[in-house]
Image: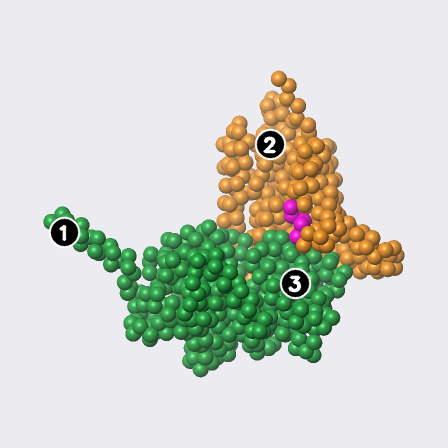
Chain colours: A green, B orange
Amino acid sequence: MNMKLKLTTLALGVTLAAGPAMAELVFPSLSYRTGPYAANGIPFADGYADYFTLLNERDGGIGGEPIRMIECETGYNTEKGVECYESTKGEGALVYQPLSTGITYQLIPKATADGIPVHSMGYGRTSAKDGSVFKNIFNYPANYWDGASVAVKHLLDVNSGSLEGKKIALVYHNSAYGKEPIRTLEELSKKHGFELSLLPVDHPGQEQKSQWLQIRREKPDNVIMYGWGVMNQVAIQEAANIRYPMDQFMGIWWSGSENDVRPAGEKANGYKALTFHNVGDDFPVFDDIQKYVVGTGKAAGAGDQIGTALYNRGLYAAMLAAEAAKTAQGIHNTKAITPAQMRDGMEALEITEAKMTDLGLPGFGPEFSVSCENHGGNGLVAVSQWDAAADSWSLITGYEQSDQDVLTPLIAEDASAFAAESGITPGC
Amino acid sequence: MPEQLAFALEVTANGLMAGVLYALVALGFVLIYKASGIFNYAQGVMALFAALTLAGIIDGQVPFSHLINAVLGTDVHHFGWHVPAFLAILLTMVVMIALAYAVQRLVFRHLVGQEPIILFMATIGLAYFLEGVGDLMWGSDIKSMDVGLPQGINAWIDETTFEAFGYGFFIDNLDIVASIIAALLVIGLVMFAQYTKQGRAMRAVADDHQAALSVGVSLNFIWILVWSLAGFVALVAGIMWGTKSGVQFSLSLIALKALPVLMLGGFTSIPGAIVGGLIIGVGEKLFEFLIGAPFLGGATENWFAYMLALIFLVFRPQGLFGEKIIERV
């Protein structure tokens, strides 16, 4: 009898550990609403949560299956982020948005071993685009190298197709994140004949006088910035102080929120930022957000972040997760999907303009598709510009594709190096 | 004048200005350490808290609005008015004095006679508590700090140096204002310490707590006074740094810039904080210009400041202006 009970308990344990289809779709949100970067973390987390709340309230979840979002505070701290992952993965987590390059790097081996997909949207390890090596890691629709390439493409466009003899300075956060575009920009400088100068800024970046005095002396034609947090605000203020033309200063998407430009006031007018999604709240989905989420008192925040760059990014991330879950439900013909099935859905994800329009997000993001070989989408990035008087961003280009001739070999090189050091046999 | 020399002069001038901003933060540490022997880890957070409070008052923000709304089901965020900067600074100072009183009554009064490391740990706790309270009171969004301070290139210096050297120097108006305010602050603090009854009592407490007590000096009052002064210095530092970068939670990290200044200038000297700040400011900027950027790939300022302080520390462990501690067996 005792043995029977033990065997029954063991069988039950094994069944639970195997990760059966659960009654809810669990989406953890590794957010940071506290600490030095809270001002950026809050709108993203609000957008991420509000979209899932909208789906629950309006549609009863995804495919009729309710969504349970588990929020875990990381404080943008890598150790806390890993703790959040460990404490929530057993809840049936379908996909993680680590929201930090540091946390992403830590989760790549862990999530791969656990069979849970990770979506590092516009951050993390760029070569994760190579799905034949990084089977559980996705970074669609664009990565850091796409950003660097489209920045140069935009500069080509505004310089009549030639950057020969031009000087471009990269002001970057002196960290793994900030150094990401260097290799790409070096390759692009060889290809297009511009001179690249590198100006690292140590964390946190509150004091940048040396870098901006150097820019004042060397007079680069353009400045590209890969910054984060206070570094962005100080850089934009210092650029204004030395009277650097704002329309020749462009940041990556993590240097392109309202938080980054508002402290400089009018002087930030004309500053440009790359983006892989649209800006503002002039989309039908926001009417539903107001009706079903804000209006019913279920908004994650005070409702004052709706339409900001980072809120929209959080909402976009949630929308992509929901669409991947729908795809997974279709592939596996089940509503209660497992993380492994979610991974399949992400790998088969296809975002078309028709689909975006149906979701109330026409023109909100680029069209792209994901495959086993390509976990990073099509590398389509747009340029936005800040209008200080209107206190808003607006897209000034369409979604342009990055230079795949340059990026594809770089990604293959980095991914194969990772595969070799991790003992992974690439394949689809 | 050779171009490189003109550049070096510009870098030196900017280094001096940056040094003044570092010294502003260091001054708060010195005041508290001098009077109570406490290394106040919370000084950076005090600057953040003061700046948050000032920005919140100017903007007419309702303190603890998220908490109030969550508990009472209301939707209040702003009073609907804007407070003039000068009045807001006065009100913020009242808050900082109240904070000093609370810190003294609720924390340090109970820790009198404890080991310095215990007092230091208490300030770590205070730092995180204040950061949380600041977030709860004023929210964590980035706020603009506009108290009417000028910013941007000083046109007169630009034109004058261009005529003299053929290259116009960049000096930020905000840095000039910060230098003047820092100079006034140091003169004021030194005069207060030398020529007022409370200042002399403060120095007596700094020299010997027991002796000061025996002649009727109230330790509690002096410590509240010192924490209030440190709060005032934190407010000035918060205004300057907040104007540069907006008021946000990373403002507390400016304390990192003050540590090498303290190591170099000494923990007990007000003029030492200023001289230390100037040496660190010029040293790190010149090193970055002459060696860091051309030969080492840049971003040398953070570690070079500490290396410079370490070199001074080896030869003068008490810092340039610190009091030499001699203990005889």
The answer, for residue B296, to whether it is visible in the render is yes
Residue B156 pos. (x, y %):
82, 58
Above or below, B12 relative to A385: above
> Callout 3: residue from which chain?
A
Sort mark 1 into few (<14), some (14-19) or many (20+) by Cα contacts within 10 Å. Answer: few
Quarter of the image with the N terminus of chain B is bottom right
Report the residue at 52% width, 29% height from top.
B114
Secondary structure beneath disc 1? helix
In the picture, the disc for residue A4 is 1
> Callout 2: residue from which chain?
B
Sort mark 3 into few (<14), some (14-19) or many (20+) by Cα contacts within 10 Å. Answer: many
What residue does disc 2 label? B37
What residue does disc 3 label? A170
Q: CA distance from mark 3 to mark 1?
A: 68 Å
Sort mark 2 into few (<14), some (14-19) or many (20+) by Cα contacts within 10 Å. Answer: some
Secondary structure beneath disc 3? strand
